[in-house]
Image: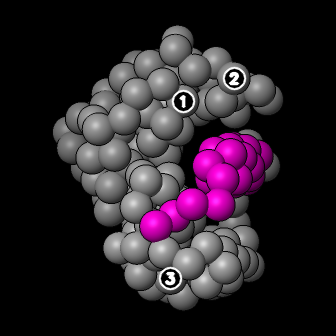
Amino acid sequence: MRRMSFAKRGFLGGMTLCGALLLGSCGESTGSGSGGFHSKYSVARNALESGDYARAKRSYQRLIAEAGPLAPRLQLEYAHAELRAGNYAEAARIAGDLARSQSGEARGAALAVQGTAQHEQALGLLAKGEGKPAKALLTQARAALSEVLKSATDLDPLGAMAGRRAQIEASLQKL
């Protein structure tokens, strides 16, 4: 099991809190019996929080199909599960697709996951000596995080995203 840096854990915890607050603010109506939906959501959320990412992903995939207006928020949590599982390319793809269809804080949250996933994927490529594709991902990650830091500053209350963007800048200067 990979160890996560303190900054990364703080960022991911913040994203989890943001997702939970966004989801919780949507009320009870999901289009299907809310009691069953909430129970299923609890299973997915608990799996994500306990590190059972395979179960979390399966649960989120099933929930998204019945989520109605909550689908974008659950897609964000699904992308977050992919990120935590180390599936950075898939997390970036899901979050990027979501960001293109959202605005405001929802877009910012999706861009934060996208940028984080792209950064982590780039770090893996750099470790393998693959500088050119890593540079492209770092550039995309910088753009995503820069937009978040410019338009949704409340998503980075502890400065973890700003710190990540600074790490990206330093890596790009070396390439």
Q: Position of residue 92 (x, y in %)?
A: 35, 51
Q: Position of residue 146 (x, y in %)?
A: 47, 19
Look at 32% across and 62% down and name the residue there.
90
Which residue is most to the left? Answer: 132
**Residue on which the image places disc 3:** 59
Give the position of the N terminus as an image quadrant: bottom right
The magenta span reads: 9-31
Residue 105: image tag:
1
Check contact, mark 3 vs mark 1: CB within 8 A.
Answer: no
Q: How dense is the environment of label 1, judged by Cα within 10 Å: few (below 14), some, or many (20 and up)?
A: some
**Which sits earlier in the primary sequence, circle 1 or circle 2?**
1
Q: How dense is the environment of label 2, judged by Cα within 10 Å: few (below 14), some, or many (20 and up)?
A: some
Check contact, mark 2 vs mark 3: CB within 8 A.
Answer: no
Amino acid on which disc 3 is placed: Ser
Amino acid on which disc 2 is placed: Asp
**Which sits earlier in the primary sequence, circle 2 or circle 3?**
3
Residue 154: image tag:
2
The mark tally for this picture is 3
- Cα distance between the residues tagged 3 and 1: 24 Å
Q: Main secondary structure of the magenta part?
A: helix
